[in-house]
Each structure stands twice: as C-alpha cells, then as structure tokens.
Image: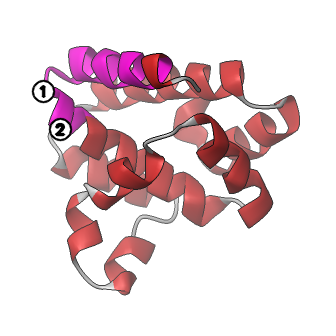
C-alpha cells in the first residue's frame, strides 16, 4: 500500500471512530496484531509488504508495552473486540472500522491472502 493509502486508512478509521490519528493508528495496530496472531508468517509478510507503517502501528497498541503474554491475549475474534472496546469503540464503530480495514486488505492483497485473513479475523469481513 502506498504511503498515501496508508494515511487515508488512518484518516478513515479516525473519522469512523471519532478519534485523532494517533488513536487511529493504535486501533489499526490492535487489528493487525490480531491478524499477525491469526495467520501464518507467509500470509502476514504479504500484509507487511503493503502497509509500510504496520510495525509502528503495532508498537502503538496499549498491550504492546507489556509482556508478550499480553500481546497473545489479542488472538481471537472476541479478544480483538475486547481490545477495541477498551480503546473506546462501540460495536457499530468496530463493524465500520473492520469493514474499512477489510476493504483495504481486499484491495491490496492477493485473494488467497484476503480469504485467509477474513476467515481468521471475521471482523474484517465487513
């Protein structure tokens, strides 16, 4: 994903969630940490190839400053929803953010990678 499209996604999530861009990057970090925990390394490398600031976003999540076990707590659909709720998102905002991120993933990644990601992180199914 070009730098411009990544910025657009940050802005889109900020608008949906009613937060500033720093908080938006944290929300995206939570989502992509969940993706990282859900898919194999080869699939995740396709994600990192199109989102140039992904590592930065993932470092910005609240749990990333804790122990490794806390990051593992992001694995699974319900864990992701809990994390997003802790960041202030309503159920409706979670669905809207998930749809926006899912659309970006579908636009930028090969279909097989998209299918695997959406299957394992259902929030991105839109």
Point out residue 24 in the picture as x, y percentages from the top left corner: 25, 33
Q: Find numbered disc 2 in the image and state the secondary structure of the residue it sits on.
A: helix
In this rendered view, identify the residue nearer to me: 104 or 74: 104
Point out residue 83 in the picture as x, y percentages from the top left corner: 29, 54
Where residue 45 sits, quadrant-wise, is: bottom right
Q: Find numbered disc 1 in the image and state the secondary structure of the residue it sits on.
A: loop
Q: Residues within 10 Å of mark 2 (few under 14, many from 20)?
A: many
Q: Determine whether 72 is above or below 75 in the image.
A: below
The numbered disc on residue 20 is: 1
Name the image quarter holding the N terminus: top right
Left or right of 14 on screen, residue 32:
right
Residue in view at x 37 percent, y 22 percent: 7
Left or right of 13 on screen, residue 76:
right
Residue in view at x 37 percent, y 84 percent: 69
Residues at marks 1 and 2 touching, judged by CB atoms closer than 8 Å: yes
The numbered disc on residue 23 is: 2
């Amino acid at each position: 994903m070009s730098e411009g499209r990544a910025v657009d996604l940050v802005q889109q999530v900020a608008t949906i969630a009613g937060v500033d861009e720093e908080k938006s990057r944290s929300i995206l970090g939570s989502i992509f940490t969940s993706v990282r925990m859900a898919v194999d390394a080869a699939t995740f490398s396709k994600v990192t190839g199109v989102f140039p600031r992904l590592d930065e976003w993932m470092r910005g999540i609240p749990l990333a400053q804790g122990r490794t076990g806390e990051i593992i707590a992001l694995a699974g659909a319900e864990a992701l929803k809990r994390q997003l709720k802790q960041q202030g998102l309503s159920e409706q905002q979670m669905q809207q953010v998930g749809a926006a991120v899912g659309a970006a993933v579908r636009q930028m990644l090969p279909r097989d990678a998209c299918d695997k990601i959406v299957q394992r992180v259902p929030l991105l199914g839109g």
